[in-house]
Image: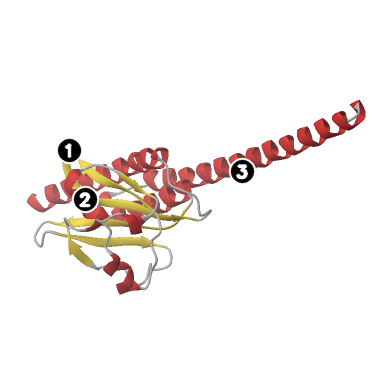
């Protein structure tokens, strides 16, 4: 039979271990919060100085960067729909294939991104190899490995303009529904900026 002293020691050891775990989680939360604030501050500065004729790509690029920081995603992209060719085009890319992926096109109805564009709904996939919509050829073409992703549509005034997606958590963990909601907020900002810039430019061309 364990003595009272032994039971007390075990209790204190367990409590110490619990407190260490709680402290580690709190530290991780504080780091994440700091990362969120830094990313949002950077995006806010871009928005404050935004001029549609000159800075739309800069705003979209900062929005994508902010999204990846908030999601803790290693890679990501912003694709726009080319209405003339009925394709999705990689316009902005962050991460390992930033230099090789921009400009690549594919049928706007193919892949997970195509499904998101076609259905105007966000999607979270934490094992793309089990998803029949996944385009393996795209990874092979650019020498990349997609493991998990979250993708949301860029929608302005009921019209889908493109798709923004985050790939592969740096931590190796899963994307969550909350990640999808957060990315959707940033996608709304990006889509509104695109729509506004297009309207301004069109108005200037008509004057």
| Pick the front one: 35 or 121 | 121
- Left or right of 204? Residue 126 is right
Pinpoint residue 49: horizontal percent, then vertical percent. Answer: 37, 47
Q: Is residue 2 above or below residue 162?
A: above
Q: Which residue is mark 3?
A: 28
| Pick the front one: 64 or 101 | 101
Please rate how many residues cluster around mark 2, counting C-alpha atoms within 10 Å: few if below 14, some from 14 to 19, many from 20. Answer: many
Which circle's residue, 3 or 2, is located before the other in the chain? 3
Q: Secondary structure at mark 3?
A: helix
Q: Secondary structure at mark 1?
A: loop
- Left or right of 198? Residue 163 is right
Q: Which residue is mark 1?
A: 157
Please rate how many residues cluster around mark 3, counting C-alpha atoms within 10 Å: few if below 14, some from 14 to 19, many from 20. Answer: few
Q: Is residue 95 above or below residue 8?
A: below
| Pick the front one: 188 or 71 | 71
Which circle's residue, 1 or 2, is located before the other in the chain? 2
- Distance from disc 1 to disc 2, alpha carbons, whole Å, reads 19 Å
Q: Which residue is mark 2?
A: 115
Q: Secondary structure at mark 2?
A: helix
- Distance from disc 3 to disc 2, alpha carbons, whole Å, reads 34 Å
């Amino acid at each position: 039979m364990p003595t009272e002293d032994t039971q007390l020691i075990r209790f204190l050891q367990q409590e110490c271990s619990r407190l260490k775990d709680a402290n580690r989680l709190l530290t991780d939360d504080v780091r994440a919060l700091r990362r969120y604030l830094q990313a949002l501050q950077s995006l806010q500065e871009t928005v404050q100085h935004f001029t549609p004729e000159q800075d739309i790509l800069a705003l979209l690029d900062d929005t994508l960067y902010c999204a990846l920081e908030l999601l803790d995603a290693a890679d990501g992209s912003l694709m726009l729909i080319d209405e003339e060719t009925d394709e999705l085009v990689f316009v902005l890319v962050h991460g390992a294939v930033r230099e090789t992926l921009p400009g690549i096109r594919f049928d706007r109805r193919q892949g997970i991104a195509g499904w998101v564009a076609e259905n105007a709904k966000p999607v979270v996939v934490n094992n793309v190899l089990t998803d029949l919509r996944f385009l393996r050829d795209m990874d092979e073409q650019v020498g990349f490995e997609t493991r998990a992703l979250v993708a949301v549509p860029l929608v302005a005034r009921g019209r889908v303009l493109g798709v923004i997606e985050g790939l592969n958590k740096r931590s190796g963990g899963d994307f969550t529904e909350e990640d999808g909601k957060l990315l959707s907020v940033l996608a709304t900002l990006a889509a509104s900026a695109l729509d506004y810039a297009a309207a301004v430019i069109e108005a200037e061309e008509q004057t």
